[in-house]
Image: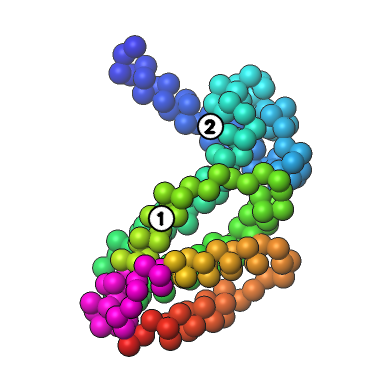
């Protein structure tokens, strides 16, 4: 196959996956996780059911792709913040704020996954990577003399636990929150524990 043909096929595949994913998210929001079917997704995407199976071998694989697509923006934003040229405490503040904002903006879709029997496979490598990033920021804050010397690994694990706990509590509540106020509560609590 020529290079041009391969590029064309890759482009078509990317468009098809995006179309199927968007249709699946729409169906998911209408029906919930338990009632999503490949037939409904195919009808919403305007493709044959067999086309769905060309890209996703099962409902579980499709749900995993939806979940990954949902989570990708916050992962990208955290990496962007981590690479920014600001102090460690400012990076940590921005990561906490963006996590809270993401949860609030995506609460209804996240709740569909949490309330269902389907649970995306936990990617411990990814979680470990996030803990490592937080640990590095805390250690950098110690070097910058913004944070006191401490067990940075344990502090990072606790901070991740708070962020996950916030996600889990928030997605089950119907009322909106003031993202700034929620951020200030969490940041003030952790900053007091970390600060020199």
- Describe the element under mark 1 as helix, strand or loop: helix
Give the number of the mark in front: 2 or 1.
Answer: 1
- Residue 14: within the magenta? no
Q: How many labels does the image show?
A: 2
* Residue 113: percent from left, percent from top: 66, 50
Q: Mark 1 points at which residue?
A: 128
| Residue located 49% across and 83% down the image | 189
Q: Is mark 2 on a helix, strand or loop?
A: helix
Residue 130 image position (x, y, % from top left)? 41, 58
Q: Is 186 above or below relative to 103? A: below
Span highlighted in magenta in the image: 137-156
Residue 55 shows up from this direction = yes
148 falls in the magenta region: yes
The residue beneath circle 2 is: 17
Q: Which of marks 2 and 1 is nearer the N terminus?
A: 2
Viewer-side residue, 56 vs 41: 56
Residue at the (63%, 19%) spot, across then down: 50
In screen coordinates, is 151 left or right of 98?
left
| 95 to the left or right of 146 | right
- Magenta segment's dominant SS is helix
**Quadrant in the picture for the C terminus:** bottom left
Q: Quadrant of the N terminus?
A: top left
Q: Where is residue 149 in the image (x, y as percent from the top left)?
A: 29, 80
Nearer the observer, 154 or 32: 154
Q: Distance between the residues labelled 2 and 1?
A: 28 Å
Q: Where 185 sits versus 26, above or below?
A: below
Q: Residue 187 carries which label?
A: none
Residue 82 as seen in the image, left or right of residue 111: left
From where the camera sits, is residue 86 visible?
A: no
Quarter of the image holding residue 11? Answer: top left
2 up-or-down from 156: above or below: above
């Amino acid at each position: 196959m020529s290079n041009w043909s391969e590029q064309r096929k890759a482009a078509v595949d990317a468009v098809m996956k995006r179309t199927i994913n968007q249709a699946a998210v729409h169906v998911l929001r209408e029906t919930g996780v338990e009632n999503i079917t490949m037939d409904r997704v195919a009808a919403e995407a305007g493709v044959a059911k067999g086309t769905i199976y060309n890209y996703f071998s099962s409902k579980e694989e499709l749900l995993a792709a939806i979940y990954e697509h949902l989570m990708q923006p916050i992962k990208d934003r955290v990496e962007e913040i981590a690479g920014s040229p600001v102090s460690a405490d400012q990076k940590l503040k921005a990561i906490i704020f963006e996590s809270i904002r993401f949860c609030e903006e995506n609460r209804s879709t996240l709740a569909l996954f949490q309330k269902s029997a389907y649970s995306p496979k936990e990617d411990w490598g990814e979680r470990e990577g996030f803990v490592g990033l937080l640990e590095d920021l805390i250690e950098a804050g110690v070097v910058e003399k913004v944070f006191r010397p401490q067990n940075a690994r344990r502090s990072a694990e606790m901070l991740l636990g708070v962020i996950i706990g916030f996600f889990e509590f928030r997605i089950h509540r119907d009322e909106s929150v003031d993202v700034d106020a929620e951020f200030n509560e969490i940041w003030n609590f952790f900053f007091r524990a970390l600060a020199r």
